[in-house]
Structures are given as C-alpha cells and as structure tokens.
Image (cartoon, rainbow, N blue to C red):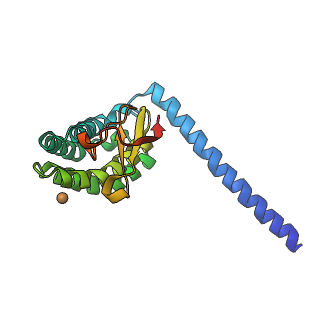
Amino acid sequence: MKNLILTFAVLTLLTAACTTDSTKKTTQANSDSTASSSEAIESPSAIDPLLNSYFKLKNALTQDNDKVAAEAGNELLNALESFDKSSLNSEQSKVYNDIHEDAKEHAEHIGANSGNIKHQREHFETLSQEIYEFAKSVGGKKLYYANCPMYNNNKGGNWLSEVKEIRNPYFGSEMLDCGTVTEELN
Ligand SMILES: [Cu+2]
C-alpha cells in the first residue's frame, strides 16, 4: 500500500511537471497567435527605444567616445523612464520590474561621467546583463551576447550586440576584436 501511494505521488509529480511544461507551450502558442491578430500584444518594437540607445552607448564605448556614451546613457535613461509596459506579458513585466530601477541608475551614471570612460564601462558591465535579460524575455530579435574574458582583471564582461562581429566595448581600440559570441538571441 505504501508503495502504491509512493508510486502515485511520483506519478502525480511527473504529471505535474509535464503539465506545467505543456501549459507553458500552450500559453506561448496562444500569445503567438494573438500577436498576429493584434500586433499591440507582442509588438517587438516596444523594446526598440531601449535597445537603440543601449547600442548607441555600446558603439560609443567601442570607439572610446565617452561624450557620445554619456549622450546615449541619458537617452537610455529617458527611454527607461518613458517605457510603455502595456505591450509586455506578465513574465516580461516581471523581468522589466526586476531590472528597471537598477538599469536607470547605471544609465544615469554613464550619462554623468563624460570624461571618465573607465567608470562608464564599469556601469555598462552590469547594465549589459540587465538589458540582456530583458531583451531575452521579450525576444523577437536577432541579437548576440558576447563575452570578453579579459575585462576587469580577467573576471570578464558581457555585452549585447546587434551585429555578430566582435567590437569590444570594454577595451575599444586597445583590443577591438577581443571576445566571442556566447549566445544568439532570436
Ligand atoms: Cu557611477
């Protein structure tokens, strides 16, 4: 009898795990089909203002340009402050809520640190992690997550890129092609 109960419990657990998984897939499929009938729901463009200013920042750092980086940091701060969450599903909203205060702070410091590219890069490192998490949860874009193993005394640093080619934002002209793409987002 004990065995039977145990078997039943295990089966229930297994079934529960499978159900959760297939529910996820169904939800995913549903939201996909809703998106085609009403583009407001899964419009990939909701994240565009954030990504555009993030990429402007990243590209400025690859060019060792602290002034444009500061400009892009301020633009990113604005984009985060005026971001319209209405197109996000609950999972995406959760990720956004998790990152958004912190990302704002990093963007603000980058904006305020023209003349100190080293400090801008320090903030860029954590910021990149946050933008990556959010972009990954929103999806719908071909993006590349890259790693430079040498940044920060070989602790390494990651960044998100719109192009596959490595252009290192942590070292700029000093080591422009140092790094590898570690993940492709779709
Ligand atoms: Cu700072």
Compared across the picture, whether 70 is left or right of 86 comes to: left
Q: Is residue 86 above or below residue 97?
A: above
Kindly identify the residue that appears in the image at 23 percent across and 36 percent down. 56
The extreme front residue here reads 174
Kindly identify the residue that appears in the image at 24 percent across and 51 percent down. 121
The residue closer to the viewer here, 46 or 168, is 168
Q: Is residue 122 above or below residue 68?
A: below
The extreme top residue here reads 37
Which image quarter has ligand 1?
bottom left
Q: Quadrant of residue 155?
A: bottom left
Compared across the picture, whether 55 is left or right of 116 comes to: right
- Total tally of numbered discs in the picture: 0
Where does the image place residue 163, in percent across and percent down from the top left?
36, 31
Q: Is residue 108 above or below residue 28?
A: below
The residue closer to the viewer here, 69 or 137, is 69
Compared across the picture, whether 17 is left or right of 47 comes to: right
Q: Quadrant of residue 47?
A: top left
Where does the image place residue 1, in percent across and percent down from the top left?
89, 72
Where does the image place residue 62, in percent across and percent down from the top left?
25, 39
The extreme bottom residue here reads 2
Compared across the picture, whether 151 is left or right of 180 comes to: left
Kindly identify the residue that appears in the image at 67 percent across and 50 percent down. 19
The extreme right residue here reads 1
Where does the image place residue 66, in percent across and percent down from the top left?
14, 44
The residue closer to the viewer here, 163 or 41, is 163
Kindly identify the residue that appears in the image at 42 percent across and 28 percent down. 38
